[in-house]
Amino acid sequence: MDKFIHSGVTFLHVPPLTGNWSSGNCCGQVKKYSKSAADEKQIQKQAQQKKQQAEKEKAKREFRVVVKGFPKTTTRTELEEHFGSCGQIRMVTLPQKGGSTKGIAFVSFASEAALKAALKLDAQEFKDSRTLKVWRAVEKATKTGAKQLDGE
């Protein structure tokens, strides 16, 4: 069956069921195809969910910093405690490789003010007399065109 749209209406082309050409049914039939109300609601719901997810991801990235210079034994909780004084934290991500952290973290904040406060912690001392490097995460395009955050 082939679908085609004409003047905003979707049609299905149904080929003939038999090889009987003498019956005048050589071109098959064209039937109007319409989506049910349930189909429409499902499609709208999926589109809304996709939009909300995209907005959440964008919000996470808008107020995000990259952190380096901490010991690889540092936990998510320790970073949350250290950056908690800056403002509300949405998420702390510690990428891992081979079961241990890569020595880099991403901290997402709920506001621009919290992000600015976190940036002031750049070059500040962390546990074990380590000096943190903190900068704003920015999206950059990869060779395949996919977006990736600076530092990943």
Image: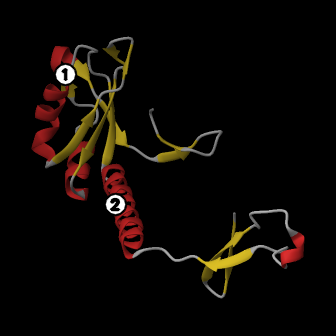
Which of 73 and 69 lies nearest the eye of the viewer?
73
Residue bearing mark 2? 49
Q: Secondary structure at mark 2?
A: helix
Q: Quadrant of residue 52?
A: bottom left
2 or 1: tag closer to the N-terminus: 2
**Could you tell me which secondary element the residue under label 1 belongs to?**
loop
Vertical position of residue 39 compared to residue 23: above or below: above
Residue at 42 percent across and 74 percent down: it is 36
Task: Residue 103: name its quadrant.
Answer: top left
Q: Position of residue 96 (x, y in %)?
A: 35, 20
Q: Residue at x 18, y 14 (%)?
A: 128
Residue 75 bears which disc, if any? 1
* Residue closest to the eye, 113 or 62: 62
> Which amino acid lies under the numbered mark 1 shown in the image of this protein?
Thr
Q: Callout 1 environment at 10 Å: few (<14), some (14 to 19), or many (20+)? A: few
The spot of residue 76 in percent (x, y) is 19, 27
